[in-house]
Amino acid sequence: MVDFSPLKDFRGTADFFLLRHGQSEGNKQDIVQGHLDYPLSGEGREQASRTGIWLAGRNIQSVFCSPLKRAAETARIAAQAAGLAPPVSLPQLLEMDTGIYTGLALADAAAKYPELWPRFQAESWEAVEGTEKIPALKQRATAAWETLVQKAAAIARGEAPAPPSRFGLLAVTHAGFFQWLIRAASGGDSWFPLFPMGHCGVYQLSLTGTVSRWELLNFQAPGVTGKR
């Protein structure tokens, strides 16, 4: 579980906005991307821009992103549209390794590895050869949260300019790793239940004192369309 105690004495509210990247060229082809480095599609860039417009005025102090193109480009476009500082690459936000399914559409993966498909349905990615396994995902997600919390705590202490009552941080990542960011903050040791992840889907966790609550779940900004 994430340790939010560095913020326990902050009397305001810290908002953590977690954002999945916009549609990539790989998404357009329904390809399992993993560490493959596809850029955004035209629709994905539009999704990122509309999301940035929605983020404007939410007092976001810092933007972090996965180093993969589809996340980094989403973060850059959204930050620019929101009038924010350029994003900082955070390797801990990288998508999970999707093993032998990488580069395949799921339908093709089922046809190529028919004996594996029932296990994939029952165990999700834990069943697929070569994937990043649950202990590593949990550890990496907790480390990513630690970076975000420490940054928020520094802002709350006045080490970076921010109004004292409420501020936000934005982290742009990927659908697979996103699952474990949620679990690291809320608990859970298996892939199930799976949380929906739309293109530029937003999850917002707000922390006030010692109380945390999910304010938004798979929210898409006005005008954003695509997979939900």
Image (cartoon, rainbow, N blue to C red):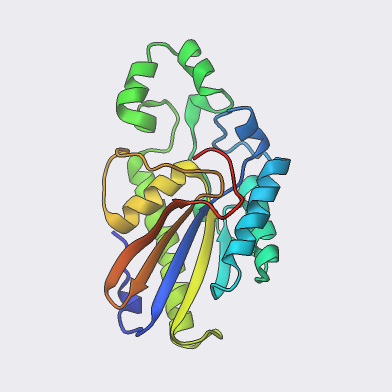
Which x, y percent locates residue 204? 43, 61
Q: In this view of the protein, can residue 121 be seen by the observer?
A: yes
Picture residue at 26% right of the left edge, 44% below the top: 189
Is residue 61 left or right of 212 when viewed as pictured?
A: right
Lateral position of residue 10 relative to residue 76, left or right = left
Numbered marks: total? 0
Decide: is 53 above or below 31: below
Q: Position of residue 128 (x, y in %)?
A: 40, 26
Q: Splitting the image into 4 quarters, where does residue 120 fall?
A: top left
Quick check: can you spot residue 139? no
Comparing 200 with 64, the one in front is: 200
Question: Viewer-proximal residue, 178 or 50?
Answer: 50
Residue 209 falls in image quadrant: bottom left
Give the percent coordinates (x, y) of residue 137. 39, 46
The part of the image, by quadrant, that contains residue 104 is: top right
For residue 121, side relative to residue 69 (left or right) = left
Residue extending furthest front? 222
Residue at horizontal 45 percent and vertical 46 percent from the top: 177
Whole-percent x, y for residue 7 in the image: 35, 78
Q: From this viewpoint, which residue is outermost toward the right?
A: 42
The residue depicted at 64 percent of the width and 49 percent of the height is 47
Question: Where does the N terminus fall, quadrant-wise?
Answer: bottom left
Q: Is residue 54 above or below residue 111?
A: below
